[in-house]
Image (tube, helix red, strand yellow):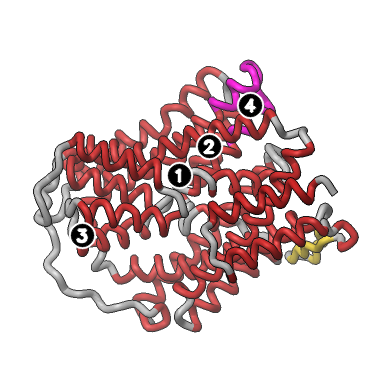
Amino acid sequence: MATTQTIPNPAASTPEFFDLLRVFTRIGCLSFGGPAGQIALMHSEVVEKHRWVDEEQYLHALNFCHLLPGPEAQQLATWIGWRLHGLKGGLAAGLLFVIPGALLMLMLSALYTLAANLDWFAALFLGIKAAVLAIVVQALIRIGARALNTRFKQALALAAFLGLFLFNLPFPLVVLGAGALGMIIAAYRPDWLALKPSTGEALAPRPTFVSMGRTILLWGAIWALPLALVLATLGQDHVLWDIGLFFSQLAIVTFGGAYAVLAYMAQEAVQTFGWLQPGEMADGLGLAETTPGPLILVTQHVGFLAAFRAPEPFSPIVAGIIGAALTTWVTFAPCFLWIFTFAPWIERLQQATRLKGGLAALTAAVVGVIANLSVWFALHVLFARVGSTEFGPLRIQWPDLTSLDWRAAVLTMAAAVILFALKWSIFRMLAVLAVAGLALGSL
């Protein structure tokens, strides 16, 4: 299979496999701060310190990973390992990037369920929810400033927000529709998307479709394996089947990172499946912000709670562990499928104008998606009761102003000052807001 071959690295000699394991164990344990911090950490270790990959290769791979659904930082780690040591290197780097955070997230989710009915625990997460709201708004501003550099992109972001917030359009329809529109616009008006012309560089040899087909079949089977086991042993009526199927579908449309899909995931988990309450989604994101690894590990929290609350025939804690493991599997197995299948095409994809146009439009739409998430979080963090009224295709959500939680409002303003004015780190802000939540919770 072509994807199992080690690709020579002209930037430097290929490191020993043990050295790769050592470096990515360190990266996996220290990769706090979301994708920006994780990408910077890998750049520091792999490009600057060890010189295993050169700058141009790293940037090409990063742009390639932005084209794929799923966490781009984890996929970049997988690509680095694949380039240096083929299949085993990709598996090692990708898994080491995820496993430390996944184990910590599992422990935190278990503690969360055991302490959920304690007053001090609710007060603690009152501050964390306020911090998460500020973090999401910060992500909205940062991504919007970078992505909305043309009037067309701004209009696309607004349309995505209105489609989700007012018309309740399905999230996959919004993001995939934006990508398809971008591919069309790229062919006729690339200036609307601020696309740079292709460089005309010489392309690498075309990978064989036979090897691609084998890779897709292998990793498709690996992806589906736990779902097949659930179907054979527990059937389609068990919550684990719903968990595996839902998060497998989510993995295909997870463009733009965890923030982009969080509102959709919350809507489905809360309203469609009844797995958790709105505030618990914000709690999960707060937990994910405190752990290393991809922020999309928040899905593991949802899977744990869903299985914990419908555990038969297992005990609640065993069911929760299985639910978390299943969620993690179907979330990250596709990442390996994308990388091992398409990494040999990386240089050719960089020249694909229509594909770049689709990505640019999709990124613009993600700004609108995150704006919808910001409003959703604000409503459910600041108000105890949120209603909705439908007028034909329109659905207006409105808060009950009498249910405003003044403590949450104060904490949110404090979080905004800390993050935007004082510019503290996210980890430090979460710690301070958690303590402040404990203090205000006693009032």
Residue at image location 42% in from the left, 82% down from the top: 192
State which tag comes first along the sequence, 2 or 4.
Answer: 2
Residue 354's place in the image compared with 387, above or below, is: below
Query: Which numbered mark, 4 or 1, is in the foreground of this view?
Result: 1
The residue singled out by tag 4 in the image is 237
Q: Can see residue 170?
A: yes
Indicate which disc residue 57 carries: 3
Query: Which numbered mark, 2 or 3, is in the foreground of this view?
Result: 2
Location of residue 30 (image quadrant): top left
Mark-to-mark CA distance, 1 and 2:
9 Å
The residue singled out by tag 1 in the image is 292
State which tag comes first along the sequence, 2 or 3.
Answer: 3
Residue at image location 58% in from the left, 38% down from the top: 301
Q: Do the residues labelled 4 and 1 touch (CB within 8 Å)?
A: no
Mark-to-mark CA distance, 4 and 3:
47 Å
Query: Which numbered mark, 1 or 3, is in the foreground of this view?
Result: 1
> Where is residue 437 shown, x and y percent of the image?
73, 50
Mark-to-mark CA distance, 1 and 3:
25 Å
The residue singled out by tag 2 in the image is 105
Q: What residue type is labelled 1?
A: Pro
> Where is residue 271 shown, x and y percent of the image?
72, 45
Query: Which numbered mark, 4 or 3, is in the foreground of this view?
Result: 3
Range drawn in magenta: 303-322
Relative to the observer, which residue lies in front, 176 or 29?
29
Q: Can see residue 386?
A: no
Indicate the secondary structure of the residue bearing disc 3: helix
Q: Which amino acid does label 2 sit on?
A: Met
State which tag comes first along the sequence, 1 or 2.
Answer: 2
Characterize the local packing of mark 1: few (<14), some (14-19) or many (20 or more) Cα atoms within 10 angstroms: many
